[in-house]
Amino acid sequence: MMTVIASAGLAVNERVEIRRNRIKGSAKGTAEKKRVCIVTGTHGDELEGQYVCAETARILSENLDKLCGTVDIYPALNPLGMDSITRGIPLFDLDMNRIFPGTADGTMAEALAADIIKDISGADICIDIHSSNIYLKEIPQIRINEISAEELVPYAKMLNCDFIWIHSSATVLESTLAYSLNVTGTKTLVVEMGVGMRITSEYCRQLTAGIFNLLKNLGMWTGDTEEVREPIVSGERAVDFVNSGADGIFVPCVEHWVDIKKGEHIGDVIDPATGKLSEYVTAPCSGKIFTLREYPIVYGGSLIARILGGDDNA
Amino acid sequence: MRKTVIYSIQSPYRKPLEITGFRFGQGEKALCVVGAMRGNEVQQMYVCAQLVNRLKELEREGCIAEGNEIMIIPCVNYYSMNIGKRFWTMDNTDINRMFPGYDLGETTQRIADGLFKGIQGYKYGVQLASFYQQGDFLPHVKLMETGFTDHTDMLDFGLPYAFVREPRPYDTTTLNYNWQIWGTKAFSLYTNATDDFDERSARVAVDAILRFCVKKGLIRTKLTGGYVTEIIDEERLVQIHSSCAGICRSRVRTGDEIRSGDLLCEIIDPLEGDIISKIYSPVNGIVFFRYNRPLEFEKSVLYKIIKI
Ligand SMILES: [Zn+2]
């Protein structure tokens, strides 16, 4: 059932509406009261979550007899951004993932944020799907704040992702949806995968399989599931950042999510006018490349890759 | 006057971005003023340019005090200004959310780092800042409370109002906050207009900074006017939100003194022309901020009133 869970008046003849598709299963069981939320579209240029929502909704609605409990799908927390390829909230120049938990008597964006939190709160699990930005491509991964790692890692492992990145709490932003929900007791997992403005169908199907596996583990799904992969957990392993040292265009010569040795060639930064090599980019450590630059133009400082160090780097 | 490049960064398609500073006087680093960090801060750049102009004149007349250096950086991010963008050209990040910067980090972290290294060690720092909200407001000076800068220093600008702000988590990456952490007494100066420039309000800001310089013994000049500054707790600002969306027809201006129950504005239905809402002031006070765009959304902040 489609419900508008938050809305506000726009200047001319229109309201912004945040919608939720509630899918209730008909199967009986102990999980009847359980609820899982799938949330995406906070950043208007991130689209991978659209296909995950669509696939999940399609499979569930064709198999209601195999679902026990409720799955709520929120395909666009920032519908105006989605509609206009705007990462933030159009006209506000504001990143929507920096205004949670919001306040009911605040501005339009803050009031919408508060309504979103209110609607999701109390779910057994919330999955917040992001897809990086237009610059970087991410291997399907779950990002977790170290303060909630113990509680969340077991669920993260069910989601069929390749990697679980546990962040130090110092770098965690307190105004995100996930942080706001986790501190108030609604377990929320942040997925980052793929790249902005694209749908990587392979990744979307991978995560969708993970969602059904999670539902099965919660006792909410009796249908078929695939065997899920065992993710690498960052744990003690270091994460190294590779930033461009020069400006130009970046041409990679490695595949995403491959093993790489320290000193090995990742790609070149070249001058587009002369073809001259501006920087020969190499791996600062041995490990696996889980973030790789997708957008070719770079300035000095542009992120080219993130490498999960191997055990020997720990 | 000495013109120097504080920091520069290469672009693959443009001439290098060169952040330029103008120095007056020699000796102890006394005051640094930073203007536009965002591409729409035309007013902030204009104020700095006028300041450079006045200081050139004062220097010719021998009115810059011995043993002190004043540096003005009118525009940090002219790359964005030249193409009508607010944030960084390539990745849309905000340089004023990157301090103290990181020389091995992302591009705007590198710019913040390069700029910050060039503007450290000054006794006083002034940033011409801009608001996220679109509107008119009364010129004022703001201090981010870190315990380092004396509140009374704000009085030397002679502006009508001064505010003290408790830093929120996202304030800790701004220039103002980091200047103070690294030992510069820092103030943010807000004047009306951002994308456009407002000559009168620019003049107020230029005079305020020159007045501050006179009070601190950095220049010798005669200035008329100036206010006895009232330091105001942010809690005294009453925010008025719109109850519905439409076209806003304001009935008051910034600086107006109003009584509780006075009409502030009418909201007009944008298609049919009816008045669909009237908004009245809940308090006695001075209109400090007024939303200045015709179209407004439900819950827009339309006014901020200093309660009296
Ligand atoms: Zn995102």
Image (tube, rainbow, N blue to C red):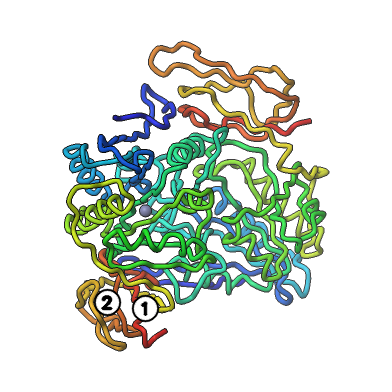
Point out residue B65 in the picture as x, y percentages from the top left corner: 78, 68
Please name whichever residue, B39 or A268, is drawn nearer the observer in this view of the structure. A268
Q: Quadrant of residue B192?
A: top right
Residue in the foreground of this view, choosing between B281 and B200: B281
- What amino acid does circle 2 point to? Val
Looking at the rendering, in which quadrant would you find the C terminus of chain B?
top right
Mark 1 and mark 2, same subunit?
yes
Q: In terms of sequence position, does the residue under pointer 1 or pointer 2 come before the other?
A: 1
Height in image: A166 above or below A59?
below
> On the picture, is A41 further left or further right than B116?
left
Pointers 1 and 2 in contact (CB under 8 A)? yes
| Distance from Cα at disc 1 to Cα at disc 2 | 9 Å
Q: Residue at x 46, y 67 (%)?
A: A167
Q: Which residue is mark 2?
A: A269
Mark drawn on residue A245: 1
Q: Residue B285: x, y in percent? A: 74, 28
